[in-house]
Image (cartoon, rainbow, N blue to C red):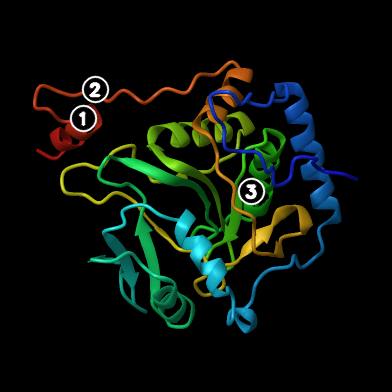
Amino acid sequence: MALSSHRNPTVVELTGATKVSSCRTPVAVALVVAVAGIFLRNHRKEDPVMPNSNDVIPKFNDEQIDLILKHFRGNRELVAKKPADSNFRPETRTLPLGVDEFREVHLKSDTCLGFYLLNKQDHIHCCTIDIDNHPDQPDPEWRDKAEQIVYFLLEQEIPHVVSTSQSGEGCHITMFFKESVEAWLPRSFFKFVISYLAINVNEIYPRQDKRSGKGLGSLLRYPGFNQSQFIDVEENWKTIFPEFHYVHPEQLQVVCANFGHRLEPEVTILTADGLPKSVAQIVNRNT
């Protein structure tokens, strides 16, 4: 059974003269997503192919690390570091994170590296759906949710990569942009996808459209730490190294338009004190 004919599309950079490919109708998409999900559930092995602690070193070669750093990027002046049994802390950089440091620290030590997605203009180069499955908040349906999202993106020809969380349980679904875009656009698109599929996923990174005050905004772990690996959902969650392709912002609007939806930034209502209404309500409850 052929689950999708649009895996790893190669033509993703659009110019003014490039025509955006047509998208499937809502009914057809719903059918494809449903059939793909049923097929995967019926044919998934009892133990899906997942990374384990015995095969994490070596994980990526230097060329692959370079590709990771070129695509998973945000505020180049900072790197987030999390030593074992500690929290993430920002580290100011004079030079961007390089291949050697990524390999020796992130892949070979117990210190995890991450990056802050929002740059100084509140633009981003990548956006991620985070599907968690923590021991204190287990989600036995996390793979089913990921598969629904992945098959929707495949059917709509939206390039993306999937990587498992550092625990090997849970995953990140990430799309990339060659030129930075305002954070609200891909965040709104992912919100639409989750709403259309009617699944419960709460975390989209960055978690905010803009930074506030001196805040740095959301950080994201780089893939590859501990048991984190890139995987192929269509191949029973097989460990791979993916091809990276960029999404053109116009693609997101076109997909949503085919479903009768328009992506727009959220409107923040300010009070007389200049605070967002939701924040002001919290302040008033505590005063």
In which quadrant of the rendered image does the C terminus lie? Answer: top left
Q: Earlier in the sequence, mark 3 or mark 2?
A: 3
Q: Is mark 1 on a helix, strand or loop?
A: loop
Determine which residue is flagged by label 1. 276
- Callout 1–callout 2 Cβ contact below 8 Å: yes
Give the amino acid at mark 2.
Ile
- Neighbor class of circle 2 (other Cα within 10 Å; few <14, some 14-19, many 20+) is few
Q: Which of marks 3 and 1 is nearer the N terminus?
A: 3
Measure the alpha-carbon separation of dots 3 and 1. Answer: 33 Å
Q: What element carries label 3?
A: helix
Q: Position of residue 238 (x, y in %)?
A: 73, 64
In which quadrant of the rendered image does the N terminus lie? Answer: top right
Q: Quadrant of residue 235?
A: bottom right
Determine which residue is flagged by label 2. 269
Q: In this view, does 181 lie to the left or right of 59?
A: left
Q: Is residue 279 above or below residue 100?
A: above
Q: Residue at x 68, y 43 (%)?
A: 10
